[in-house]
Amino acid sequence: MKKIIYSLLLVLFPLFLSAQSNDTLKKLSFMGDFRFRIEQDWKSLNSSGVYRDDRTRLRYRARFGVSYTYNDWLSSGIRIRTGDPKKQQDPQLTLGDGFKEFGTLPIAIEKIYAKFNYKWFSAWVGKNAFPFEKQNELFWSDNVFPEGVALSGKFNFEKNFLTSLQINTGHFIVATQGKSLESDSYFQGVQIVTTHWKNRIKIFPSYYSFNKMPNIPDGNETYLLDYSIVHVGANIKLVNHPKIMAGFDYYFNTKDYDKKDSIPEKFKNEKRGFVSNISIGNLAKKGDWKVQLTHTYLERYAAVDFLSQNDWARWDYSSQGSPDGRLTNFKGLEIAGGYAIDKNINLKLRYFIVDQIIPTGNDKETGNRIRLDFNISF
């Protein structure tokens, strides 16, 4: 904890010192948010055919960040958050969850980067948000911030059919071995994003290559695994008022695991995923509302489970020494609704129903979860 605080002060102190001048102060931007969550889990069956105890949790998250715009083409930023640093998918803290008679709370740096923008080209180095287009967290969690180098080029057109074309790529290191780059655990991605008919339709085919990923996170792996995932995503704005959107994602891991003896036979061809959603409304201003329905079918190796979301069910690697979630090999439904109390204040309600596709033990795991979030941001 002390190392994190000292590092943060070391980065921010020169900015605050130089901010004594009005010109420098204008170049600083601050952001923050707070979330309070009420969550209930029930009818959650484990792989042994035994129901987990029903669980009620009161949770919260806080984040604070600052960015500095040096000039038109260069900026940098840093953001801290609450949450266990070992749980990259989950920055939320649970009230009363083992913090020793109202002791101090865990805080970690989730973003620290330098960013470049020049005409059609942009890039960042450091640790930052996932740089590829996505419309949900079922492949990659919003709370997981990769470390590496991201490059992007965007071109706008005045044609009716093709509004814009963007190319995203990057190299991101999951765990370095201190040797050559090919010996690291890493992932690389390349994506083309096109918009059509004045941004009514967006299409974003992608390819992701994961090298030497552990089968169990946090240093508890028993073997390493490569992934080669092709993704085709698209969404369309059906109606402007109220805003009605529909989206679809297809994932296919082209890697051949037939000769991978460490993978059980029943999982070797579990490499596809389908996600579809439809939503009505948005939460842009006071009084806005939104309703969304999402259906998911995600096989075991269609994504890296400990880098994707852990919202839909309480399945994790705790029995194998890691607090991270394992949310692939499931099918389910999410029903969500939201209401904007003010421009930066809203309520969101989400209900999840989940079933395992192939059992890892004697029985298929299940899950039912409902949560209510109160969000404030500035």
Image: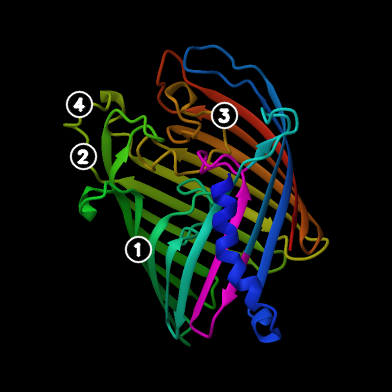
272 or 102: nearer the viewer: 102
Q: Is residue 246 visible?
A: no
Q: Residue at x 49, y 34 (%)?
A: 325
Secondary structure at numbered mark 3: loop
Q: Is residue 84 magenta?
A: yes
Q: Earlier in the sequence, mark 3 or mark 2?
A: 2
Chain part drawn in magenta: 66-91
Q: Earlier in the sequence, mark 1 or mark 4?
A: 1
Q: Earlier in the sequence, mark 2 or mark 4?
A: 2
Q: Please, is residue 14 above or below residue 130 in the view?
A: below
Residue 311 position, x and y percent, is 58, 39
Q: Earlier in the sequence, mark 4 or mark 3?
A: 4
Tell me the kind of residue under disc 1: Gly
Residue 176 lies left or right of residue 114; in this view the side is: left
Residue 31 position, x and y percent, is 68, 64
Q: Please, is residue 255 above or below residue 240 in the view?
A: above
Task: Return the residue at label 1.
Answer: 170
Looking at the rendering, which quadrant does residue 295 occupy? top right
Tag 3: Cα neighbours inside 10 Å, few (<14), some, or many (≥20)?
A: some
Q: Please, is residue 42 above or below residue 153 in the view?
A: above
Secondary structure at numbered mark 4: loop
Q: Residue at x 34, y 59 (%)?
A: 189
CA distance separating discs 2 and 4: 12 Å
Task: Return the residue at label 3.
Answer: 314
Question: Which circle marks residue 256 in the picture?
Answer: 2
CA distance separating discs 3 and 2: 30 Å
Task: Return the residue at label 4.
Answer: 261
Tell me the kind of residue under disc 4: Asp
CA distance separating discs 1 and 4: 31 Å
Q: Residue at x 55, y 64 (%)?
A: 11
Q: Is residue 210 magenta?
A: no
